[in-house]
Image (cartoon, rainbow, N blue to C red):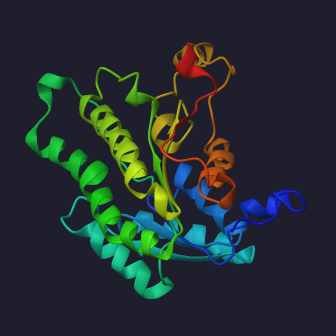
Amino acid sequence: MPPNAATSPMSLFDLTGRTALVTGARRGIGRSIALAFAAQGAHVAIHHAGTEQEQRQAAAVVAELTQHDGHAHPFAADFAQPGAGAQLAAAVTQQLGPIDILVLNASIELLENYRDISTDRFDQQIAINLRAPLELLQAILPGMTERGWGRVLAIGSVQQVKPHPEMLVYAGTKAAQLNWVRSLARQVGHSGVTVNNLAPGAILTARNSSRLTDPERRLQVERRIPAGRLGSPDDLIGAALLLCSEAGSYINGVDLFVDGGLGIT
């Protein structure tokens, strides 16, 4: 039963006692969501792929959270490897207990002409963007339904509906992910579990920043956005908290764009 919103509306966003796994949480959107969840009382599993640089970045996120009385632990898993999703779910559950919130944020995009897509590069994107998330869902979702509460939030992309000509595979995986969200939302919605998709637009992450070093190119992108600016990872916080808390208990199977209006242009 949700808290009495009439007397304490903000308590609907409280995540105290919840355990959240955020994949790809060492930087960018994943980091912002992880910090926000911890600030709301959640115990957060900070996933990274396991390289030395990523280990340092994940440790920095954990240190920042700890400094502000948050609770977080880093977990390494290379989603390019078979079984990595299931292994990550098992490791988090063993150390932190049952997972209440799953944010599927980690992904990879490789820009290239469709004629040049190799089997290896295709397989890498499918493994990280679809196979590992499926393994996580298979490992975590049944427990959520059995306990009668859970939140699954997939981080999509404007590429779902406006595919970049050099992102054929990436855009396709994001469209498939949205299909999964809608299917699973129907299957588990009766059990107190919600499954939703959050689709960022042009967000100034490290990955996107490298493509916008040219001031003229950046200005062209900003002109196409009704809000008149690029988004920041923190612009995703409000929507993520809504969809992953009691406040969003009656929101299921949605595809929520956070794009400054880019999708309507």
Is residue 260 or residue 250 the one in the foreground?
Answer: 250
Is residue 9 or residue 188 the one in the foreground?
Answer: 188
Is residue 113 or residue 149 the one in the foreground?
Answer: 149
Say which residue appears at 64% left-offset and 52% top-offset. Answer: 248
Left or right of 251 in this view: 97: left
Percent x, y for residue 164? Answer: 35, 23
Q: Quadrant of the N terminus?
A: bottom right
Above/below status of 232 relative to 30 = above
Farthest residue to the bottom: give it: 94
Farthest residue to the front: give it: 190
Percent x, y for residue 199? Answer: 50, 37
Above/below status of 47 relative to 43 = above
Quadrant of the rendered structure where residue 168 is? top left
Q: Quadrant of the C terminus?
A: top right
Percent x, y for residue 62? Answer: 59, 73
Say which residue appears at 47% left-offset and 79% top-offset. Answer: 98
Say which residue appears at 17% left-offset and 41% top-offset. Answer: 122
Percent x, y for residue 82? Answer: 18, 65
Left or right of 140 in this view: 210: right
Quadrant of the rendered structure where residue 229 is? top right
Say which residue appears at 42% left-offset and 81% top-offset. Answer: 93
